[in-house]
Amino acid sequence: NLVFRHVERSADGTEEQAWLETVDLSNPATPVRLAARELPDGSGHSLLIKNGAQVLTSHWEPVPGQGNKVKFYLDRVSYSSGQPGPVSSKNVPGALLAYDAASTHALTLDYKRISVPVAIPDTCWETYGWNTSLEQLNNGSYICSYMEQTLKLVDVNANNVTVLDTETLDTDVIFYCTRSTETRVFSQSYRYDANTSTYSIFVIGDIGGNAIQSEWHDLPQQQYLWSVAAQDERLVLANSSQPGIHVLDATDLTNMTLVKKGDVTNYVQSVTLDGDS
């Protein structure tokens, strides 16, 4: 069975309606729609996470009377024989990145908009990175705004939500193409510093303990690699300038390896992993 999410946005773009759709692909030539489960409405929804027979996501809603703040909720649906159970929602500190059912631990990413005065415009991006905005006031001074992103490891057991550990990410790094498996979170990153561009993979390890485990693996700068699939402790990347398939093995976070597995003749997309293939 395949579970995917269907999303419709309001005309003004401020609200999303979302459903989980279940499709039976036992005969790929004639897929059969089995069921749908409506998710809570929100201003947006995060990526889908599979853990055993559960599918999890999160959504965020505006805080009434505080237009610049939102609340995040972890949404969980359990499946049995292709049929979804009811949606369980719980307020958590940030958008969902990973979940471990055995420990009831979740990894979230929380956001905080920070504004600081700067004397000259260049100080804004030189200090806080490219993900910034600049406002000039009537008196000629400047206000630099940036988004602080913080990883939070939380226990979301049946009774409450407890923050176990946090890690604030560098403001001068842009993260994109995030992929989660049941044991790892992979996110590509870009940093521009001193006229040098650095592309890396940010990897987060097992979240079953009480501390966040994270490491960086720099990518070859002469090649542009982008992630196309992930499974367990492996991330598959493709390269267009020198077409090929590469695999990052993050079994050991302190000794990750990136190996080219083969050449291809053209652009790579829609990759599906089947065991070791």
Image (spheres, rainbow, N blue to C red):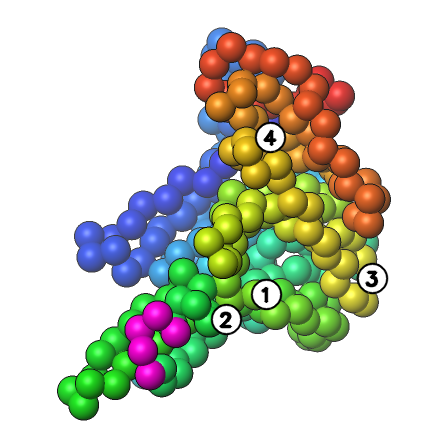
Residue at 55% over, 48% down:
198
Q: From the image, give the main secondary structure of the stretch colored magenta.
A: loop
- The answer to if 194 sits in the magenta stretch is no
Label 2 sits on residue: 148
Q: Which mark is residue 169?
A: 1
Q: Are marks 3 and 1 in contact (CB under 8 Å)?
A: no
Q: Are marks 3 and 2 in contact (CB under 8 Å)?
A: no
Label 3 sits on residue: 209
Q: Nearer the viewer, mark 3 or mark 1?
A: 1
Q: Residues within 10 Å of mark 4 (few under 14, many from 20)?
A: many
Q: Amino acid at mark 1?
A: Leu
Q: Are marks 2 and 1 in contact (CB under 8 Å)?
A: no
| Alpha carbon distance from label 2 to label 4 | 28 Å
From this view, report whether residue 51 is shown above or below residue 137. Answer: above
Residue at 18% over, 90% down:
139
In terms of secondary structure, where does tag 4 sit? strand
